Image (cartoon, grey):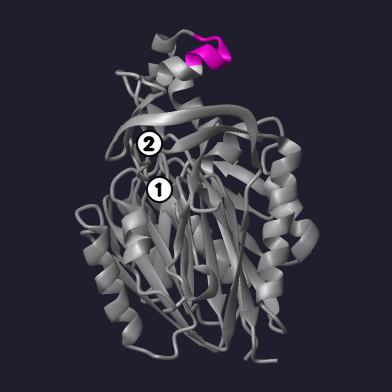
């Protein structure tokens, strides 16, 4: 049986109605096929329990996995206050799992994932959606055994000021958790990723960092360094809109021979940057700036990588996970990244996606998965049965 995907999207006054309408649409478009996996992305304004209740009332026992986002993405671009549901059907099998203790220990959650992966040696790939405000995704990735199953996914997002975000798996929802889907059968998953931010010449030394808080750059509060660069008073960086627009200007930190992007979630009242990955004291960091053109080019590159990774498998669906900074940067051209992806994959391939606070991609050459900030990740699903 040929693998196929169908997308449903809805806006409504409450999450249950939006979920119900999205599921109804997707099932109608799927036709006679039985859903083997549902991927659910919902606006953080909705209550997670209501969204899942609405979707599950029509999907019955079909495996379901999902996360919250400020806006959702489909073939037609960006949609606010919406729920999007992608249903996949065909000769493959999916198992979804709810790991509620992710925020307490990324290392223990990684051990649980490895146990689940070992249950079936023929797993093709695993999708992960974790809390973007709570938990250590970098610790999770580094604790996953190198060369194991390809893990990919993203960190759920929502209200950057309140930290409102959630994850979904089956009938379970909540914060501080991780939802996972393990896939096997006649499908292949190809992953591509890129970003559109480049160094502009400003270099700093990280002089004090504690956990997820980057306190000082060159011996001064991080907000003072940005105040000098951009001309806004340091105290203004602790309040909207600057406290979350700081994510538009991430840091490139040296990690071996690479320059790894690390982005603030927000600026705190004391002038420190709240990150979701540790930045070590004593390393050099470079200011990065993005552009519309560079991001659209990166989106095309990510789609090309994903398509190439599929080999001879025919793509039938794409999941697109984009950093929330892209939504800010592309405000004048919302959904521009989807157009760039479609230029590569074609307009007929169903697309669903959302905005994330970090991305997880398979490691290169048998290494552990990598945790990224500021990237777009294109996850192409291909049919190997034909």
Q: Is residue 336 visible?
A: no
Q: Which residue is mark 1?
A: 15
Residue at position x 24%, y 52% in the image: 103
Quadrant for residue 52, please give it.
bottom left
Prevalent SS, magenta region:
helix
Q: Nearer the viewer, mark 1 or mark 2?
A: 2
Q: Residues within 10 Å of mark 2 (few under 14, many from 20)?
A: some
Quadrant for residue 80, please give it.
top right
Q: Secondary structure at mark 1?
A: helix
- For residue 284: magenta? no
Residue at position x 50%, y 45% in the image: 254
Q: Which residue is mark 2?
A: 282
Task: Please name whichever residue, 351 or 305, is drawn nearer the observer in this view of the structure.
Answer: 305
Q: Position of residue 378 (x, y in %)?
A: 61, 61
Label 1 to label 2, Cα distance in Å? 46 Å
Q: Is residue 120 visible?
A: yes
Q: Is residue 236 left or right of residue 345?
A: left
Q: Is residue 224 left or right of residue 76?
A: left
Q: Secondary structure at mark 2?
A: loop
Residue at position x 48%, y 85% in the image: 184
Task: Please name whichever residue, 164 or 289, is drawn nearer the observer in this view of the structure.
Answer: 289
Of labels 1 and 2, earlier in sequence is 1
Magenta segment range? 227-232
Task: Please name whichever residue, 42 or 134, is drawn nearer the observer in this view of the structure.
Answer: 134
Residue 327 vertical position relative to residue 377 in the rendered view, above or below: above
Q: Position of residue 221 (x, y in %)?
A: 36, 19
Task: Please name whichever residue, 53 or 257, is drawn nearer the observer in this view of the structure.
Answer: 257
Q: Residues within 10 Å of mark 1 (few under 14, many from 20)?
A: many
Q: Position of residue 141 (x, y in %)?
A: 37, 62
Q: Are marks 1 and 2 in contact (CB under 8 Å)?
A: no
């Amino acid at each position: 049986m040929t693998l196929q995907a169908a997308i449903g999207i809805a806006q409504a006054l409450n999450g249950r109605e939006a979920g119900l309408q999205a599921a109804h649409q997707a099932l109608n478009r799927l036709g006679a096929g039985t859903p083997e996996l549902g991927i659910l992305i919902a606006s953080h304004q909705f209550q997670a329990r209501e969204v899942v209740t609405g979707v599950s009332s029509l999907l019955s026992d079909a495996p379901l996995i999902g996360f919250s986002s400020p806006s959702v993405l489909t073939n037609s671009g960006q949609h606010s206050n919406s729920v999007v549901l992608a249903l996949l059907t065909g000769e493959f099998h999916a198992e979804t799992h709810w790991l509620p203790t992710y925020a307490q220990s990324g290392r223990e959650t990684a051990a649980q994932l490895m146990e689940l992966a070992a249950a079936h040696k023929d797993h093709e790939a695993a999708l992960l959606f974790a809390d973007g405000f709570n938990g250590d995704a970098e610790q999770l990735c580094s604790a996953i055994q190198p060369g194991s199953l390809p893990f990919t996914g993203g960190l759920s997002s929502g209200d950057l000021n309140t930290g409102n975000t959630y994850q979904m798996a089956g009938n379970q929802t909540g914060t501080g958790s991780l939802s996972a889907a393990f896939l096997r059968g006649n499908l292949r998953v190809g992953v591509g990723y890129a970003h559109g931010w480049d160094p502009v010449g400003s270099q700093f030394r990280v002089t004090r960092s504690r956990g997820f808080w980057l306190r000082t750059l060159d011996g001064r509060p991080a907000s003072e360094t940005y105040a000098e660069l951009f001309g806004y008073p340091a105290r203004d960086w602790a309040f909207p809109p600057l406290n979350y627009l700081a994510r538009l200007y991430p840091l490139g930190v040296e990690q071996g021979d690479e320059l790894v992007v690390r982005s603030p979630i927000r600026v705190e009242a004391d002038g420190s940057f709240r990150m979701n990955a540790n930045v070590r004291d004593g390393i050099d960091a470079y200011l990065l700036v993005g552009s519309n053109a560079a991001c659209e080019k990166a989106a095309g590159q990510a789609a090309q990588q994903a398509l190439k990774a599929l080999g001879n498998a025919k793509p039938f669906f794409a999941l697109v996970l984009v950093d929330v900074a892209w939504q800010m940067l592309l405000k004048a051209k919302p959904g521009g990244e989807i157009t760039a992806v479609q230029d590569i994959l074609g307009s007929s391939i169903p697309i669903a996606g959302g905005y994330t606070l970090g991305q997880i991609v398979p490691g290169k050459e048998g290494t552990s998965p990598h945790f990224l900030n500021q990237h777009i990740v294109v996850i192409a699903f291909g049919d190997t049965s034909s």
